[in-house]
């Protein structure tokens, strides 16, 4: 038995009706590199079965504390059934890109059941109508609850089921699988002890915040950063429906790096924030909804150590960055976003990168759950603006990967929406199809964004404008 951390459990408590809190991704493979040019469903099942012991995510499920008096636990599922979690489907005709995005968005909109290990995999055939893909391709959609992993640990999870060559490598045999039945008495006893520790945790947290407050005030005096308090409301801050849309745009890594080098000190992430800013500018302007003042984004930051990262779960802080969407010139916007990013990092360091984690450990989970549900039911989550969107950077492997011999040639990544934030971007960099690429994927509410293909085009045009302004 392993108890969830406060931050992991937060994604369970934050799961409201119509707002599932799982992350997902689609990987597309070319079967031509596999032996015989074919990968069968049973081969994928066999590969997964051989590697189940390499990650605890595969076979563990939730065990809740009676009366929700404490954070839930991960326990091994004695009735684990691999074929329940791995499903085999096909795209409806014509099997084009639009059909793939529609199918994936519908699957992504459904919550993951909590009485089994919290992941699902769909092997999707029938991609023959997608023009930019070879004719012999299939896709895999993987959904994992955010309580079980974040983007960084998700990238490590993908390494487990892939190989570096078309040849499927043998893995070390598993040790004995120990299934421990959860003890209600033990969980209640732990909850009782934790309740007595809670006042001391609150005092320690308050003591940490006093020097953090002083550092923030000093930083403001020195103009090392500024507060982004006057945040603008957009269509993405309205009530979120149960329905989702997804899409992605792919960019050449070398071009992105060349753009970065034109602005002193800028990073790859600054370039991608500039692309997102330009895309949102163009999209909202087409609706006559572009605010005069800048939009802001939330950027998750990984605060885990190497040991913590290998253990899985969430170790994430947050920083708020201005998208400088009130600047029309793309090159000037890139320089401004870089300055804002530097200030936001300074602010996050002054506050303390692990404050968000520490806060979730202090707040009782059932209190947080009730507060979120009450806020959603009364509309409080739409009354204020925390972020206009979220942009998270997930570094992928810098080498080519294969699944059962099939070459990985494309990827899309999807995140969860949250109250008041109906647009989520993931920047994923990796080597695919033997060259470096950066994929910018997005998830949104279908009522807020009924035209995802148009928004994807806005992102393409934003990148083209940035390229023209910086490289030509």
Image (tube, rainbow, N blue to C red):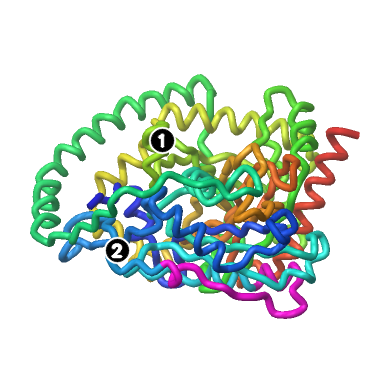
Is 118 placed above or below 326 here? below
- Is residue 280 shown to the viewer in this render? no
- Residue 43 placement (x, y as % from top left): 56, 63
- Is residue 127 shown to the viewer in this render? yes
**Mark 2 vs mark 1: which is more N-terminal?**
2
Label count reads 2
Local SS, label 2 = loop
Q: Is residue 317 magenta-colored? A: no
Q: Is residue 96 magenta-colored? A: yes
- Callouts 2 and 1 close, C-beta under 8 Å: no
* Residue positioned most to the bottom: 93
Q: Residue at x 79, y 31 (%)?
A: 258
Q: For mark 1, what is the residue?
A: 304
- Viewed as shown, does residue 357 lie left or right of 179? right
Local SS, label 1 = loop
Q: For mark 2, what is the residue?
A: 77
The magenta region covers: 82-102
């Amino acid at each position: 038995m392993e108890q969830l951390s406060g931050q992991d459990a937060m994604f369970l408590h934050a799961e409201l009706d119509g707002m599932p809190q799982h992350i997902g991704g689609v990987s597309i493979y070319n079967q031509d590199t596999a032996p015989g040019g074919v990968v069968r469903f049973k081969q994928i099942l066999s590969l997964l079965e051989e590697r189940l012991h390499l990650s605890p995510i595969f076979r563990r499920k939730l065990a809740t504390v009676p009366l929700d008096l404490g954070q839930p636990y991960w326990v091994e599922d004695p009735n684990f059934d691999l074929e329940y979690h791995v499903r085999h489907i096909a795209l409806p005709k014509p099997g084009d890109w639009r059909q793939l995005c529609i199918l994936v968005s519908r699957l992504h909109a459904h919550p993951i059941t909590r009485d089994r290990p919290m992941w699902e995999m769909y092997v999707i055939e029938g991609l023959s109508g997608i023009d930019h893909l070879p004719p012999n391709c299939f896709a895999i959609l993987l959904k994992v609850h955010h309580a079980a992993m974040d983007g960084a640990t998700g990238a490590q999870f993908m390494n487990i089921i892939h190989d570096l060559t078309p040849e499927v490598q043998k893995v070390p045999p598993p040790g004995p699988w120990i299934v421990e039945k959860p003890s209600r008495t033990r969980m209640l006893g732990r909850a009782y002890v934790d309740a007595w520790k809670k006042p001391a945790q609150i005092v320690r947290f308050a003591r940490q915040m006093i020097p953090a407050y002083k550092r923030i005030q000093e930083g403001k005096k020195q103009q090392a950063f500024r507060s982004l308090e006057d945040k603008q409301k957009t269509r993405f801050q309205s009530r979120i429906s149960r329905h989702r849309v997804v899409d992605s745009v792919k960019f050449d890594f070398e071009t992105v790096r060349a753009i970065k080098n034109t602005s002193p000190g800028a990073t790859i992430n600054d370039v991608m924030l500039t692309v997102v800013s330009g895309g949102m500018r163009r999209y909202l302007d087409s609706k006559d909804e572009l605010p005069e003042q800048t939009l802001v984004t939330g950027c998750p930051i990984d605060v885990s150590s190497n040991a913590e990262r290998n253990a899985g779960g969430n170790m994430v802080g947050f920083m708020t960055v201005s998208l400088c969407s009130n600047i029309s010139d793309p090159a000037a916007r890139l320089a401004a976003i870089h300055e804002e990013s530097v200030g936001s990092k300074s602010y996050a360091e002054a506050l303390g990168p692990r404050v968000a984690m520490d806060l979730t450990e202090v707040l009782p989970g059932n209190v947080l759950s009730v507060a979120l549900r009450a806020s959603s039911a009364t509309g409080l989550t739409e009354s204020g603006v925390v972020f206009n969107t979220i942009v998270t950077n997930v570094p992928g492997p810098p080498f080519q990967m294969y699944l059962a011999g099939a070459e990985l040639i494309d990827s899309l990544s999807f995140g969860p929406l949250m109250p008041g934030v109906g647009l989520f971007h993931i920047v994923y960099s990796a080597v695919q199809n033997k060259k470096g690429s950066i994929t910018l994927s997005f998830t949104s509410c279908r009522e807020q964004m009924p035209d995802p293909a148009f928004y994807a085009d806005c992102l393409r045009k934003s990148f083209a404008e940035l390229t023209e302004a910086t490289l030509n």
